[in-house]
Amino acid sequence: MSAPPDVLVVGAGVSGLSCARELVAAGRGVEVLDRARGVGGRCATHRLLGMPFDLGVPFLHGRNADYLAAVRASCPRRIEGWPRIVQGTGRPCQPEAFRPGEERIAPADGVATFPRRMAAGIPVRTGALVARLDLGGPLQGVVLEGGEEIRARHLVLALAPEQVLRLLNGVADPPRPLAAIRALLETSASEPSLSLCAAYPEGTPAPAWDAWYPEESRVLQVLGHESSKRDGPPLVGLVLQAQPGWSRMHLDDPGWPEALLAEAARVAGAWAGRPTATHPHRWRFARSDLASELAGPVLVRLPSGGSVGICGDRFAPGGGVEAAWISGRELGRRLAAPEVA
Ligand SMILES: Cc1cc2nc3c(=O)[nH]c(=O)nc-3n(C[C@H](O)[C@H](O)[C@H](O)COP(=O)(O)OP(=O)(O)OC[C@H]3O[C@@H](n4cnc5c(N)ncnc54)[C@H](O)[C@@H]3O)c2cc1C
């Protein structure tokens, strides 16, 4: 049997990978677990008819120099400044992406290039859903769906706040600081998003815009022109993202993809409602609400000498991928400090 890792990170999204990278660089033993088949979480790219579609965050943006350097180093093929041609005055998913000083980058092979490159050299186990935590003993434990237990001295939860809360709520008699953090996380209200990748038939003229934020639609938040991010795209493709309020109302409605296409046709023309292939995705927790963001990650020391850390997009100012990366890096550095080892 292999020795337990020093640090177990739950979540191979940008925050978990950023934390794990700091720990690996400091020579600490790390294992990252993720329930999905691949890494990246909400920084997700899906291939449809041979073209990458970004079905979560549509592009990377930020103003932190280290973050932007990391994105550029991981994504040598990229379009700077995307979306360059914006139509409509509706509210973008993250309005600060368009403020002065913010830099926008669309990786030409999809946003998931960034987490995939970050994962190089990090032991990641995919298909590993953590069903519950066991914080009672000298080592912190996670129990996977199926019953397997994995233990480590330190545990990092790098998940959407609601997913952290679900795991913490299953801990009987948690240490006081964790109970307090649980109460804080109760105030989280991540916005959901229903997203649809749509590939159009040969001969469809490419739209003149990169992104369209329709100001009067209660259904569609954005029509993203995916093929405008790609080098020599094989087809015209859009990603349709629904408004958070509409998404919340239709999360369990099986007819939402058709409703989204009908609205795309109304907004952009009949062609937009007639794709040859689609791929729907339901994000229950797409973005944490701006009002509930915290200044930094959390690190709680346990009586056993181990610790539980929490990072993610809610745990640094500004939210989104940049905050996820910054909070993961900070937590990794704190855990790598000699006094925590
Ligand atoms: C539609 C959409 C639009 C967005 N638009 C923007 C935008 O414009 N700008 C921006 O900056 N951000 C945007 N975001 C948000 C951005 O993608 C996230 O803030 C960021 O990717 C979060 O990274 P993370 O590592 O904190 O969490 P995640 O990426 O969610 O990573 C968490 C990981 O944990 C895994 N996991 C969850 N539960 C378990 C479990 N029990 N056991 C094991 N693994 C588990 C998940 O599979 C996932 O891989 C958008 C997101 C979506 C979905």
Image: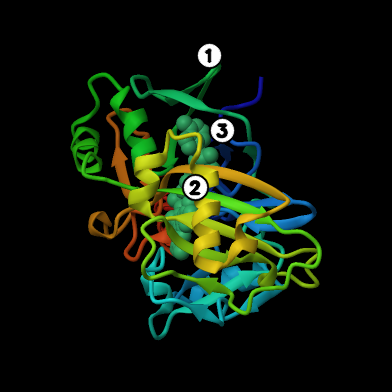
Q: Amino acid at mark 2?
A: Ala
Q: Give me the disc on residue 259.
A: 2
Amino acid residing under circle 3: Arg
- In this rendering, the answer to whether 7 lies above or below 102 is above
Q: Nearer the viewer, mark 3 or mark 2?
A: 2
The residue lying at 49 percent from left, 66 percent from top is 267
Amino acid type, mark 1: Gly
- Asked whether, in this view, residue 149 is left or right of residue 341, the answer is right
Circle 3 is placed at which residue position? 35
Q: Residue 209 location in percent, x, y?
A: 58, 77
From the viewer's side, name the closer residue of 45 and 184: 45
Callout 3: SS: loop
x and y, in percent, of residue 62 in the image: 46, 73
Instruction: Find out whether the residues at labels 2 and 1 contact each other: C-beta distance under 8 Å.
Output: no
Q: Which mark is residue 147?
A: 1
Q: Quadrant of the C terminus?
A: top left
- Which tag is nearer the camera, tag 3 or tag 1? 3
Q: Residues within 10 Å of mark 3 (few under 14, many from 20)?
A: some
Q: Is mark 3 within 8 Å of ligand 1?
A: yes
Q: Residue at x 33, y 48 (%)?
A: 190
* Cα distance in 3D space between marks 2 and 1: 40 Å
Label 2 crowd bin: few (<14), some (14–19), many (20+), radius 10 Å? some
Answer whether residue 187 is visible to the viewer in this image.
yes
Quadrant hosting residue 213: bottom left
Ranked by sequence position, the earlier of labels 3 and 2 is 3
- Nearer-N-terminus badge (2/1): 1
The quadrant of the picture occupied by the N terminus is top right
Measuring 30% from the left and 55% from the top, which residue is drawn there? 289
- Give the image location of residue 319, x and y in percent: 37, 61
